[in-house]
Image (cartoon, rainbow, N blue to C red):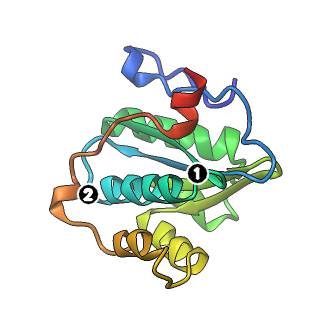
């Protein structure tokens, strides 16, 4: 049960699960974080824009929760799913958001919104096709604080 990490309490405190890893050749962009965070809101927008513009290559997965619940999820994610240990620079990451990539071959931890922006700019060159994605790969606005909690494309497909 990948990511069916039981946090206890209400339904909103339980992280949604995947049914399977992404199919061969597809990358799942995962964003987790606080329900109220301009950095998390911007990371979600970047991931969603990438998926909408490149649906055959990318899908998305999102998990947003209040502070304490998210921090519990993040600790479990880093230890139990991503298998990060104290030698990883991301082991100490405690802020929101936390982003990672999944492929059929395994997971790649990215880190916060700033690292997602770096990955985005490196992955999507400056072309007219990529302009809408690159336009979002900037510092967030206070208007990004209210995080859209619509499930990611992989979660919607599993329903």
Q: Which residue is mark 2?
A: 38
Q: Position of residue 46 (x, y in %)?
A: 42, 60
Going by the picture, which residue comes out furthest to the bottom?
Answer: 126
Q: Is residue 149 left or right of residue 125?
A: left
Report the residue at 54% width, 31% height from top: 155
Residue 124, compared with residue 27, is above or below; it is: below
Residue 128, compared with residue 91, is above or below; it is: below
Q: Is residue 116 left or right of residue 39?
A: right
Name which of mark 1 and mark 2 comes first in the sequence: 2
Q: Which mark is residue 104?
A: none
Q: Position of residue 25 (x, y in %)?
A: 78, 53
Tell me the mark number nearer the camera, choosing from 1 and 2.
1
Q: Secondary structure at mark 1?
A: loop
Q: Are marks 1 and 2 in contact (CB under 8 Å)?
A: no
Say which quarter of the image contains residue 77.
top right
Q: Position of residue 78 (x, y in %)?
A: 62, 47
Residue 97 visible in the picture: no
Q: Which residue is mark 1?
A: 55
Image quadrant for the C terminus? top right
Q: Observer-nearest residue: 113 or 74?
A: 113
Report the residue at 67% width, 64% height from top: 88
Report the residue at 70% width, 23% height from top: 1
């Amino acid at each position: 049960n990948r990511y069916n990490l039981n946090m206890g309490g209400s339904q909103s405190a339980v992280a949604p699960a995947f049914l399977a890893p992404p199919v061969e050749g597809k990358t799942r962009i995962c964003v987790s974080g606080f329900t109220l965070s301009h950095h998390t809101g911007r990371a979600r927008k970047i991931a969603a824009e990438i998926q909408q513009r490149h649906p055959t290559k990318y899908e998305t997965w999102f998990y947003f929760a209040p502070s304490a619940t998210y921090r519990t999820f993040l600790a479990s994610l880093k230890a139990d799913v991503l298998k990060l240990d104290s030698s990883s620079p991301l082991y100490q990451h405690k802020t929101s958001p936390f982003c990672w990539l999944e492929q059929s071959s395994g997971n790649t931890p990215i880190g916060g919104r700033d690292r997602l922006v770096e990955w985005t700019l490196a992955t999507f060159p400056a072309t007219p096709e990529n302009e809408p994605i690159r336009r979002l790969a900037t510092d967030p606005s206070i208007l990004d604080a209210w995080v859209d909690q619509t499930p990611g494309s992989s979660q919607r497909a599993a329903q």
